[in-house]
Structure formats: C-alpha cells, structure tokens
Image: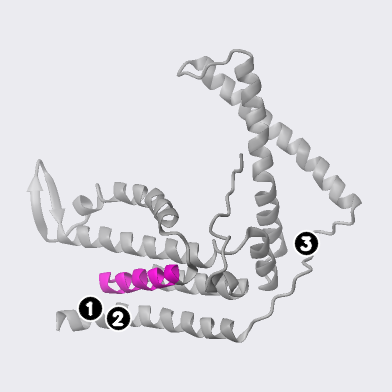
C-alpha cells in the first residue's frame, strides 16, 4: 500500500512540462496575492484564474473535486460559526443567535480564497514529482536542510507506515481487538512507541549507510533545468494573472458600488 500517491504528477499537459522552478515561484506569488484579497469580487476572480490553470493542467476534474471536498469539509464547519459571531447588520435572529450579512460575506470570502489557493497548489505544485520538486527547491537556493528534510520525509513516510502495519498485524495475530477500553488505548500507545523506536533505529542505520557512500549533507541531481520560450510565455501569463487578480480586488468593488 502506498501512502503518498502522486496522481497529479502523471501527465503531459502544458503545466506538466513547465519548468518546476517557474511553477514554484508562480504558486507562491498567486497564493500570496490571493491571501491578501479583501473583497468577494477579488476572491472570485482568483478562483476563476485558478480554474483556468486547472484547464491548462489537464487534470481529471473528479480527482480534483475529491481533494476540494476534503478541505471544504473543514470550511463547512466555519459556516456554522462565522455568520453568527461576526458583528454587523442582522439578517435573521432566533434563539439568541444573530445571522449577519458581514458574517456571511466573511465566510464566503474565506471559502473562495481557500479553494483558489488550493487549486493553485494542485495545478502548479502537485503536477511536479516530489523528487523533481526537491531539485527545483535546491535550484532556487532554498536552505539545504529544509530540502533535505522534505526529500527524506517523502522517502521514509511509507517505510514508517509499513512498520506500523507490521506491528498492527502482529498485534491482531496475538488476539488484539480494537475497542474503547483502557487496554486498547494502552496497546495503541505501545504500538506507536515501538514505531518511533524502530524508526529511530532505522534512521541511524540509513544515515550511517549514506555516510559510508560519501554523503555530505545534500543531494546532487544529474538533471539540469532549462527555461524554454514557452516557459517565459507562461511566466508572463502568471505575472499578468496575479496583477489582474489584485486589480480586480481593488477596482471591481468600486464599480459595483458606483
């Protein structure tokens, strides 16, 4: 069983072929611009821009919707509180709860911005394999230790998960049946402790093996990135998109109220 499935990184669309460094910078730029938006028209324009990138990525809509549903499940909880706790013009009052227009607008703003940022991350970052992403981060001069942690964590999360499955199967073979009793909680505590201990021992062995093979604290890539003319065109498109989103946030509300 695979813990991390890089489903979105498999493809041959325009965004899949784009230079990973460009996609990283673009994702950071668009996410930052979206995060500082303060109006619903601006957030809606950001979501429309993210949908345009989704079209360019060629990703399956159903798979993307599954990811969005996971995030929106948490956002849905926010809709239970923000409309009733944000002060403003009351629209509805019952049992001491006051529904305000400002609360609904704030919840809608957060929803639009969250979905737009997530779509930017999916279309620009998830379309890049993790190993290639690490190489791109190194090319962008991200601190080597952070890049090293990313690549090692990606490589050994599945190993740790397999260790957990092995211990869980061993517990079931010995008659362990999960429940809500103190014995169950104690067993899971022992199981997690053994996973941590075994993971630490494995990490020590792997690190010593890497040192014996000449490891000096960083990974070296044989592949060199080259920015093509198409990449430059996409870079101009991303910058233009970020500017348009920012202008929409500042200008559209003015025209709307005028």
Quadrant where the image shows the N terminus: top right
Residue at image location 42% in from the left, 73% down from the top: 33
Q: In this view, does 68 lie to the left or right of 214?
A: left
Residue 196 location, quadrant? top right
- Real-space Cα separation, disc 2 to disc 1, in angstroms: 7 Å
Q: Does the segment drawn in magenta span residue 45?
A: yes
Which residue is pictured at 15% across the width and 80% down the height? 257
Residue 233 lies within the magenta run: no
Position in image of residue 24 (x %, y %): 57, 70
Q: Name the dominant secondary structure of the magenta segment.
A: helix
Give the labeled residue for mark 2: 250
Q: Earlier in the sequence, mark 2 or mark 3?
A: 3
- Please tell me whether residue 238 is drawn above or below residue 109 in the rendered image: below
Q: Which of marks 1 and 3 is nearer the N terminus?
A: 3
Front-most of 130 and 99? 130
Count of numbered circles in the view = 3
Residue 211 falls left or right of residue 104: right
Q: For the C terminus, give its image quadrant.
A: bottom left
The residue tagged 3 is 219
Residue 55: x and y, percent? 42, 70
Q: What element carries label 3?
A: loop
User: Disc 2, disc 1: CB below 8 Å?
Assistant: yes
Determine which residue is flagged by label 1: 253
Q: What stretch is highlighted in magenta?
A: 39-55
Q: Position of residue 72 (x, y in %)?
A: 35, 52
The residue located at (68%, 72%) in the rendering is 141
């Amino acid at each position: 069983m695979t813990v991390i499935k890089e489903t979105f990184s498999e493809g041959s669309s325009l965004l899949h072929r784009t230079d990973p460094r460009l996609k990283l910078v673009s994702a950071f730029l668009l996410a930052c611009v979206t995060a500082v938006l303060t109006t619903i028209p601006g957030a809606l324009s950001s979501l429309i821009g993210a949908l345009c990138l989704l079209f360019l990525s060629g990703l399956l809509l159903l798979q993307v919707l599954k990811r969005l549903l996971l995030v929106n499940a948490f956002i849905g909880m926010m809709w239970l509180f923000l409309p009733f706790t944000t002060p403003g013009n009351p629209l509805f009052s019952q049992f001491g709860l006051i529904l305000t227009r400002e609360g609904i607008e704030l919840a809608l703003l957060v929803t639009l911005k969250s979905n737009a940022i997530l779509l930017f991350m999916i279309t620009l970052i998830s379309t890049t394999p993790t190993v290639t992403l690490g190489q791109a981060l190194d090319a962008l001069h991200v601190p080597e230790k952070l890049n090293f942690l990313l690549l090692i964590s990606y490589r050994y999360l599945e190993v740790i998960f397999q260790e957990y499955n092995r211990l869980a199967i061993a517990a079931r073979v010995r008659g362990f049946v999960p429940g809500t009793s103190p014995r169950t909680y104690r067993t899971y505590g022992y199981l997690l402790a053994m996973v941590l201990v075994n993971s630490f021992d494995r990490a020590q062995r792997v690190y010593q093996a890497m040192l014996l093979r000449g490891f000096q604290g960083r990974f070296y890539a044989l592949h060199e990135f080259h920015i093509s003319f198409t990449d430059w065109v996409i870079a101009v498109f991303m910058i233009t998109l970020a500017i348009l989103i920012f202008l929409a946030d500042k200008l559209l509300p003015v025209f709307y109220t005028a």
